[in-house]
Image: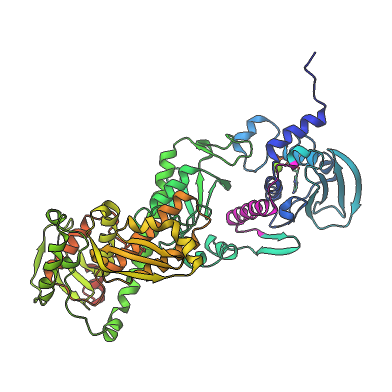
Amino acid sequence: MKIQKLARQEAQKIAAGEVVERPANIVKELVENSLDAGATTITISVKQGGKTHIAITDNGCGMEPEDAQICFERHTTSKIKTIDQLQDITTFGFRGEALASICSVAKVTITTKTADALEGLQLKIENGIIESVKTVASQTGTSITIDDLFYNVPARKKFLKTTATEWNRVATLFKAFALDNCHVHFKLIHDDTVVYNCPPTKTVPERIIQLFDAPLTNHVMGLSEFQENDISISGAVTTQQYARYDRNGIFFFVNNRWVKNYQLTNALTKGYLNVLPSGRYPAAVVCLNINPKTIDVNVHPKKEEIQFLNPRVVESAITAAVKTTLENHLSEQLKRTVSLAPELQYNAPIPPPPFNPLAELPFMPEEKIQEPEKKEQQAPEQKEESPEPIPVVEQKTLEQKGTIIGHYNQTYILLEKKDGLLFIDQHAAHERILYEKFKERFNEVAIVNLLFPITVQISTENMQLIEPHLEIFNQHGIKIEQLGPNQLAIKATPVFFKNQPINDLIEQVIGWVKELQQVNKEDFYKTITEKLRAQMACKAAIKAGYSMTTETMEQLLADLETCDNRFTCPHGRPTSFLLPLNDLERKFKRKL
Ligand code: ADP
Ligand code: MG
């Protein structure tokens, strides 16, 4: 006979593994219990990332002595009595499993008092059995401490990660709870040091300020409220000026439950499609409220994942909410920029000589791709051209028709449109155009071999950082060779980059390499490439304060039309701003 029935306690220890894998799981179950108990103050204290000690203290309803003595047995719950009630459940817990599981794998002390009781009750539990019970003086609420996690399950103890990793998970979970329950005063203590102390706040952005550092907190804004069908969305997101390389700043809550769902994250980043470079992510707190009948939270034993009946509807609602928020923010920002314009006029630098960006465009017109030299010779002739008076030109090629009526401050192209006056920032627009061209066809860029290679001195340390990545420069038309342990030689550059300080660019790339050391290889390469292209586009783009001929302005607008992300430059600054006719008429009191 081989089959044997496991002793009850052994079976319980195994079952516990489902809920209790690591300290963060315990913290999660206990904080959920505190929230279920109506607590408005919850303090979490852990030692060594929770591996040696966890304590949660709340000011919730507490337990009566009879309840306290059975709360840690299996299937004991005050939250449902029959399965029919599952549908209407509003609490986190209902299975009556958590305390039982925790008590079977750690030494637990429960201290609890209801508002009516004169004194509290303290129970010590070991191996799932009450070791001692006594009355103690205590505040209303419950305090649960966990010591010696997995002391009796050495196999699980081995799977605990480093203190830093376990602490990280606890801290992230803490942020999630705090973000989703602004009305609760949360405190997190690690190794006797208070790490977060978050009194209640009215809004999510205020909460974010308690939990995160600049620059994230400088770029956070409330999410435009969204309400449609059975879905409502609120929360906070970062502006287009903020971006990070990971998704760790993104939190989703569905009916007050923190969930991890790849599709939801995708829907969010889709909202940023035109404003953040690919591989960059915003930070966001998105709280969804949805008819509970249209979701299933029981797909995962720890209830961290979720399934929607109509995922597409939810996803497009999120994308729409984010888009609206960003658009509103952008137009607010632009209104502010424009109100500053008159001041700039007085400080405007003396404009440099006229410049023809067409002559300097990094891409040869199709038919001339094979003959970059010829193009170069033509360039000076065109440069001689002086800016003509600006004739009115119909922009028939423009998607939304408009007429160029001027060039303000040698920086902004003015395009008259039916519904208002469009200002286009020539530098931002050109930057966007170049960046997109670089993305599509960098291999077609014309290159010049330098007669005298430029040598660049760098430190041994920087050489070690940059040497493995010299190929990236090569792929961008900059031919670099290592001459010695501290010396690089630049032998060729793209035509349009000929007169740019390449050593600056190398310095910059070294900085990015340092910054991105922790990033995986694929993301690293993608990010560096993107940054390099954005930087080259920025350097090569026509600057503010340069005069332009009408033809070049036309060309610029036509090129901008073809860009996917024509509303912002690669750094996220806007390329254009519409002054609506209505607003103008209101200013002059022609209209109310
Ligand atoms: P569940 O949350 O699924 O009911 P648990 O094992 O987590 O199961 O908890 C068992 C019961 O213990 C709960 O139903 C609740 O009545 C009680 N309880 C646990 N923690 C607290 C707390 N912090 N405050 C008040 N009651 C609690
Ligand atoms: Mg519970």
Q: Is residue 78 visible?
A: no
In the drawing, does residue 471 fall left or right of residue 206?
left
Farthest front residue in view: 484
Relative to 255, say whether 4 is above or below.
above
Residue 125 lies in the magenta stretch:
no
Segment colored magenta: 157-185
In the rendered image, which quarter contains the C terminus?
bottom left
- The number of numbered badges drawn on the structure is 0
Residue 65 or residue 395, whichever sits in front = 395
Image x and y of residue 468, in percent: 45, 56
Prevailing secondary structure class for the magenta stretch in the rendered image:
helix
In the drawing, does residue 142 fall left or right of residue 175?
right
Q: How is the image coloured?
A: rainbow
Ligand 2 resides in the quarter of the picture at top right
In the rendered image, which quarter contains the N terminus?
top right
- Which quadrant holds residue 211? bottom right
Residue 173 lies in the magenta stretch:
yes
Q: Is residue 584 visible?
A: yes
Image x and y of residue 57, in percent: 76, 55
Residue 286 or residue 376, whichever sits in front = 376
Image x and y of residue 573, in percent: 34, 66
Look at 28% across and 63% down and name the residue there: 492
- Which quadrant holds residue 420? bottom left
Image x and y of residue 86, in percent: 63, 34
Residue 126 or residue 162, whichever sits in front = 162
In the drawing, does residue 66 fall left or right of residue 276?
right
Look at 64% across and 51% down and name the residue there: 169
- Which quadrant holds residue 529? bottom left
Residue 105 or residue 83, whichever sits in front = 105
